[in-house]
Image (cartoon, rainbow, N blue to C red):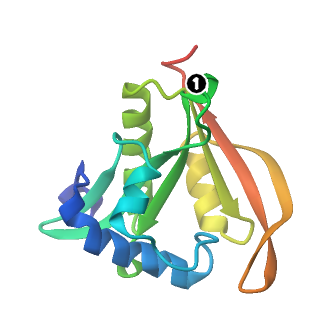
Amino acid sequence: MSTRMCSVEPMREKDWPVVRRIYDEGIASGQATFETQAPGWEQWDAGHHSFARLLLKSSDEILGWAALSRVSARQVYAGVAEVSVYVAANARGKGYGRTLLEALIRESENNDIWTLQASIFAENVPSIELHRRCGFREIGRRERIATLNGVWRDTILLERRSQVTGI
């Protein structure tokens, strides 16, 4: 399926059941997050910016989602956000993650976010490469930062500085 047949749309609360299913698929992969279960809507909603909550849809099917979360409640970090990009298991490897991440970058800049960061498991090479292709640079490796299912994991910290806001 071509990404040209898809549209990026705002995520709404009514979309949460499908968004949560895609999130659960990412959790099940063991490569997407330290979370072991997706939260309810209220908790997820409280932890993410109210803007830049995006869905990638083909017809009526949601193929993936992306959103931004705060990295700190301190005002000096108001322009810094962490990215989340999840693609449905049956839609991976088709360019949908890039479509979502590029749209998320545009939305972040439209909302005065000057730095995006991503923390990705070191083994998740496709996600690291996706972020690099979208202008992120590696700024460090966090060794044995936390455990997932009893196994210590390293994460790669990447960031992207806007060329249009915060300069």
Q: Say what amino acid the circle numbered 1 marks.
A: Gln
Which quadrant of the rendered structure holds the C terminus?
top right
Q: Is residue 40 visible?
A: yes
Most distant residue in the right direction: 143
x and y percentages locating residue 76 in the rendered image: 63, 23
Most distant residue in the top direction: 167
* Number of numbered callouts drawn: 1
What residue is rendered at 44% in x and 38% in y? 105
Q: For the residue carrying disc 1, how many other residues have a C-alpha within 10 Å: few (<14), some (14-19), or many (20+)?
A: few
What residue is rendered at 28% in x and 59% in y? 56
What residue is rendered at 54% in x and 21% in y? 163
- Please determine whether, in this image, residue 167 is positioned above or below residue 22: above
- 135 relative position to 139: left or right: left
Quarter-wise, where is residue 135 in the image? top right
- Please determine whether, in this image, residue 25 is positioned above or below residue 55: below
The residue nearer to you, when weighing 100 against 118, is 118
Quarter-wise, where is residue 127 in the image? bottom right
x and y percentages locating residue 96 in the rendered image: 37, 61
- Please determine whether, in this image, residue 81 is positioned above or below residue 166: below
Which residue was labeled with disc 1? 75
Q: Is residue 91 visible?
A: no
x and y percentages locating residue 43 in the rendered image: 42, 61
Which quadrant of the rendered structure holds the N terminus?
bottom left
- Please determine whether, in this image, residue 127 is positioned above or below residue 88: above
What residue is rendered at 69% in x and 46% in y? 158
Q: Could you tell me which secondary element the residue under label 1 belongs to?
A: helix
- 141 relative position to 165: left or right: right
x and y percentages locating residue 18 in the rendered image: 27, 73
The residue nearer to you, when weighing 18 against 158, is 18
